[in-house]
Image (cartoon, rainbow, N blue to C red):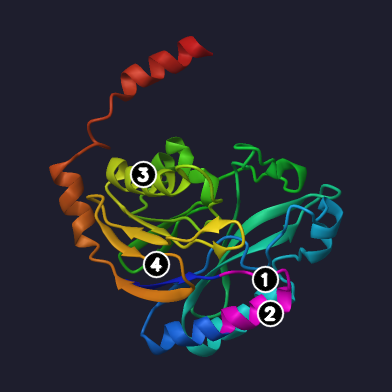
């Protein structure tokens, strides 16, 4: 699975409109021979600040709801895998999971990741509407590709990316809704490149554009080189990953192998 389509969209507040957009982009990605299309965070709908937590729970669905079912049908019909972030119903009243669903090319839900790190920063408080997940998702393997899933704010936590890399990930996928603000584009670019460089892997980061978001969806290689930057307009770009580069970079820059886990363990014990 080396040809990946990165979708940059401006989600509306209407779930059905966004589903129609997603299905159209799935068809476009398939026409360009992509094996996977990765959508940004909040694909299901834009949640404006004025929307209450109770109202957002009415938008949310289960993983077997109509939104994902339509995408599963499209994945099967087109023979293409899909990464589709949704608002998922949670067990907590007036809170939803921020969930990334991996649908394989047979239309089967292969993995579900619920965002661990909620964006309670820079004046935002996602925990007012969201409920956090409690674990990383198992890697999704396809051929030589081993994908680790993250979502947006997770990029600011190097521990998570490293855990996924240690589990064997050679590609990290981070659907995002990166909020505009002073230096936020610089932060976005820096975090993506840092996670790629320190783990010797590809990072694929489809992002929302418009509303309150920065755009600039990116793909970065294991040496930190930008392969794709979608700027500030909606669109779709297909890239091909050379996964041999991961092994070459990890041999030349063996950051994972050179870790001093003996010292880290000692320090962790003292901190506890």
Question: How many neighbours does mark 2 have within 10 angstroms: few (below 14), some (14-19), or many (20 or more)?
Answer: few
Query: Residue lying farthest top?
Result: 270
Q: Residue 20 in the image: x percent, y percent?
A: 64, 83
Which mark sits nearer the N-terminus, 1 or 3? 1
Give me the residue at 66% from left, 41% from top. Answer: 124
Q: Is residue 61 above or below residue 122?
A: below
**Disc 1/disc 3 C-alpha distance (Å):** 28 Å
Q: Is disc 3 placed on a helix, strand or loop?
A: helix
Question: How many neighbours does mark 1 have within 10 angstroms: few (below 14), some (14-19), or many (20 or more)?
Answer: some
Tell me the quadrant of the picture where the N terminus can be found.
Answer: bottom left
Residue under label 2, please give it.
17
In depth, the one of 2 and 21 nearer the eye is 21
Which residue range is magenta in the image? 10-23
Give me the residue at 66% from left, 54% from top. Answer: 98
- Residues at marks 1 and 2 touching, judged by CB atoms closer than 8 Å: yes
Which mark sits nearer the N-terminus, 3 or 2? 2
Residue under label 3, please give it.
190
Q: Is residue 151 left or right of residue 223?
A: right
Which mark sits nearer the N-terminus, 1 or 4? 1
Question: How many neighbours does mark 4 have within 10 angstroms: few (below 14), some (14-19), or many (20 or more)?
Answer: many
**Disc 2/disc 4 C-alpha distance (Å):** 22 Å
Q: Is disc 4 placed on a helix, strand or loop?
A: loop
- Residues at marks 3 and 2 touching, judged by CB atoms closer than 8 Å: no
Which mark sits nearer the N-terminus, 2 or 4? 2
Residue under label 4, please give it.
230
Residue under label 1, please give it.
12
Q: Is residue 239 above or below residue 97?
A: below
């Amino acid at each position: 699975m080396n040809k990946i389509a990165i979708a940059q969209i401006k989600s509306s507040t209407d779930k059905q409109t966004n589903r129609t957009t997603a299905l159209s982009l799935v068809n476009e990605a398939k026409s360009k021979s992509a094996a996977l299309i990765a959508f940004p965070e909040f694909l299901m709908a834009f949640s404006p600040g004025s929307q209450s937590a109770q109202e957002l729970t009415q938008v949310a669905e289960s993983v077997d709801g109509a939104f994902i079912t339509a995408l599963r049908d499209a994945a099967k019909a087109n023979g293409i895998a899909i990464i589709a972030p949704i608002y998922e119903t949670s067990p907590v009243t007036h809170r939803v999971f921020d969930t990334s669903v991996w649908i394989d090319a047979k239309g089967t839900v292969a993995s579900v990741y619920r965002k661990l790190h909620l964006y309670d920063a820079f004046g935002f408080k996602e925990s007012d509407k969201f409920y956090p997940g409690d674990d990383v998702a198992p890697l999704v393997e396809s051929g030589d590709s081993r994908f680790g899933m993250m979502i947006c704010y997770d990029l600011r936590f190097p521990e998570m990316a490293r855990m996924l890399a240690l589990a064997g990930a050679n590609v990290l996928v981070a659907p995002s809704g990166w909020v505009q603000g002073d230096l936020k584009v610089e932060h976005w670019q820096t975090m993506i490149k840092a996670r790629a460089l320190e783990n010797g892997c590809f990072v694929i980061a489809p992002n929302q554009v418009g509303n309150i978001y920065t755009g600039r969806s990116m793909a970065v290689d294991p040496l930190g080189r930008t392969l794709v930057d979608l700027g500030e307009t909606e669109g779709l770009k297909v890239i091909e990953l050379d996964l041999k580069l991961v092994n070459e970079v990890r041999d030349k820059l063996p950051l994972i192998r050179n870790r001093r886990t003996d010292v880290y363990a000692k320090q962790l014990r003292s901190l506890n």
